[in-house]
Image: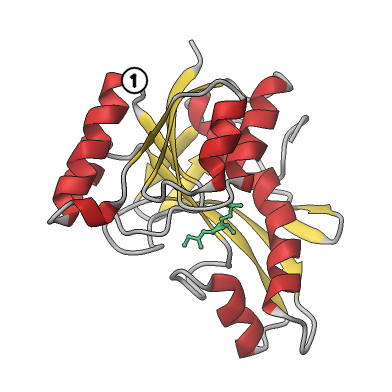
Amino acid sequence: MALPLAVIVSGSGSNLQSIIDKIEQGVLDVDIRLVLSNNPEAYGLERARTHGIDVWTKSHKEFPTREGFDEAMIEAIHRHGADTVALAGFMRLLTPVFLSTFQGRVLNIHPALLPSFPGTHGQRDAARYGVKISGCSVHFVDEIMDHGPVIIQAAVPAAPGESADDLAARILVQEHRIFPQALQWFAQGRLKVEGRHVHLAGYGDYDAQTVDGALINPPLEKGF
Ligand code: GAR
């Protein structure tokens, strides 16, 4: 059975789109049961509707507590039969109430090479700092922001003085590759977490791969 997934977005939802595309191409064995957003204007909701996916949206400002908002999301996710959650550009911290409900089953995409540049402006912070290499990370979510065990990372070169938008666009291309791939490994039950380390079943050696100038580890599989 396809992995029953909920996806939470706050904005454009291009990462959501990359997940939808891989499902429609038949390489990602996931069933998106619900797309949620704390931003009723999020374009990601429109993308979901276009593909016939149920949506749930409420502004977090309607809730007196963070837990209250998370409990409402938990209820909606359960009602739609999802047991795994992908954070695809969700710009809020989840509470322990949410994380204990979906223990070990929440994955996040972050637009920097963690542990560098956590937070909501990873690309801008990297561009301002003047790093020569940045990238993106998919990781399991724990109670500390952008902190849980890393599943896959892609590294891209950064140019001196380039705008945060240019760097972000180059990173985003790789996000669209590594997030669906990480979800497929999770759906296949191939990820095993030991402390901070995520092991991928079926890989004896971790030959990192170079795709269009990005270094990706573990390497992408066929179709991703
Ligand atoms: C993506 O770059 C994602 O990595 C980032 O927000 C963007 C959402 O774009 N997430 C974070 O910064 C989380 N800290 P999208 O809505 O087009 O997928």
Q: Which is more toward the observer, 91 or 126?
A: 91
For residue 26, what is the image quadrant? Answer: top right
- Taking 61 as reference, is 130 above or below it? below
Badge 1 residue CB within 8 Å of ligand 1: no
Residue tagged by mark 1?
80
Q: Which is more toward the observer, 87 or 36?
A: 36
Residue 204 visible in this rendered orientation of the protein = yes
Give the x, y percent position of residue 191.
Answer: 48, 36
Q: Residue at x 45, y 24 (%)?
A: 54
The single residue placed furthest to the top in the displayed view is 1
Give the x, y percent position of residue 209.
Answer: 78, 51
- Taking 177 as reference, is 65 above or below it? below
Give the x, y percent position of residue 133.
Answer: 71, 75
Q: Which is more toward the observer, 15 or 212?
A: 15
- SS class, disc 1: loop
Q: Residue at x 77, y 83 (%)?
A: 162
